[in-house]
Amino acid sequence: MGDVLAGIHATWEFDSDSVLIRFGRGIRTPKLFQALRERRVPHAALASVTLSPGKRGTVVLRAVPRPGADPLMEAADGQLRDSGDPYRLVLPAERETLAEYYADELRAALTAAGPADAGEPAERFLVAAPPAPLHFKAYDGKVSFDGSKVTFRWFWTGASSAKWKQGDQSFAVPELSGVEWRSPEVFDGHLRMVRRGEDRREFTRADHDPTAVVFGLGYGPVHESLPFAAAVLAAVRTSGPGPAGSGGPGPVPVPAIASGRRHPADIAERIRHLGELHRAGLVTDDEFSAKKAELLAEL
């Protein structure tokens, strides 16, 4: 096809075997789109195409991904708002005829090249995940992923005593069976690492669980935490069942990071976070001074 269709927050470029979605970077563009920048979606990753009326004089062209084809949508698990759906292209209503033409062309391409079982789950991820390294700040800790392991470093001012006693946590990708992302736009938003062999019914509250970080106002926003969850999930799906000699896919112990002298950058980050809480009036002058001195003593 090789044509380009420009929408309000994105542009779709139609190739012979895929759709390249380039997201805008304007101030009104959803932050998730800006973070993703662009995504190439193979026809094999799509189940269907729809065209429907939108809000305030617009039409919406949507490519419907196959279950299991996109790690971002798998991690989101239906929690994204329509305005944050990267598979929706919003256009002015006067471009409906043009949008209908491209919808028909894409449907024809899917019929010609797509799998007969387009509505069935894909056997593997077909859309690339956001690349590592990735990191973001949750309410109770700093989260990082280097491509091979996930690290939680707790904030003294946000983490529960249960997490603080367990110490900072590190999870090697082969030890995990998946991730659980609960949108920060809901009350109990969190990101949890699911270890192999764990029973989800046994999970404790996220604020007391050392395998989870909790979100909050300004902490773990969708455009940071969801791409992070997708990257980890993609790495887990392509990883083996665990270290050699672990006896297969059973649970593998996750040791806390050894206590002792911390990296200066980690100390600086904690002091900066403490300062934010102090300026917000959530920490008193005495508490700020005492904790800052305690952190500096760890250098």
Image (tube, rainbow, N blue to C red):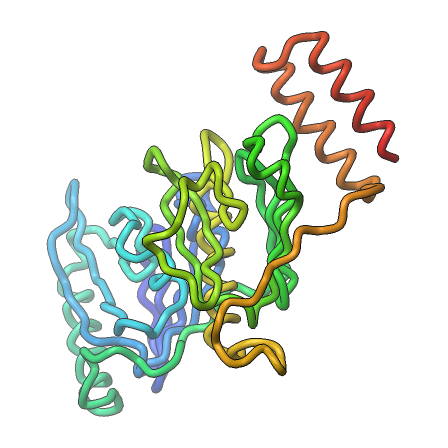
Count of numbered badges drawn on the protein:
0
Q: How far from the left and from the top, in percent, is residue 296?
A: 84, 27
Image quarter hosting the C terminus: top right
In the rendered image, the vertical position of residue 122 relative to residue 28, given as above or below = below
Q: How far from the left and from the top, in percent, is residue 31?
A: 44, 45
Relative placement, left or right, of 101 versus 169 is: left
In the rendered image, the vertical position of residue 176 relative to residue 272, given as above or below = below
Residue at image position (45%, 29%) is 217
In the rendered image, the vertical position of residue 65 relative to residue 200, given as above or below = below
Relative placement, left or right, of 261 versus 142 is: right
Query: In this rendering, does residue 30 appear at all?
Result: yes
Along the viewing direction, whichever of 221 and 92 lies nearer the viewer: 221
State which quadrant residue 44 falls in.
bottom left
Relative placement, left or right, of 292 versus 43 is: right
Residue at image position (30%, 57%) is 77
Residue at image position (66%, 43%) is 167
State which quadrant residue 121 falls in.
bottom left
Along the viewing direction, whichever of 30 and 290 lies nearer the viewer: 290
Query: In this rendering, does residue 105 appear at all?
Result: no
Residue that protrudes farthest toward the top in the picture = 285
Relative placement, left or right, of 142 versus 32 is: right
In the rendered image, the vertical position of residue 11 relative to residue 117, given as above or below = above
Residue at image position (51%, 56%) is 228
Q: How far from the left and from the top, in percent, is residue 9?
A: 36, 51
Image quarter hosting the N terminus: bottom left
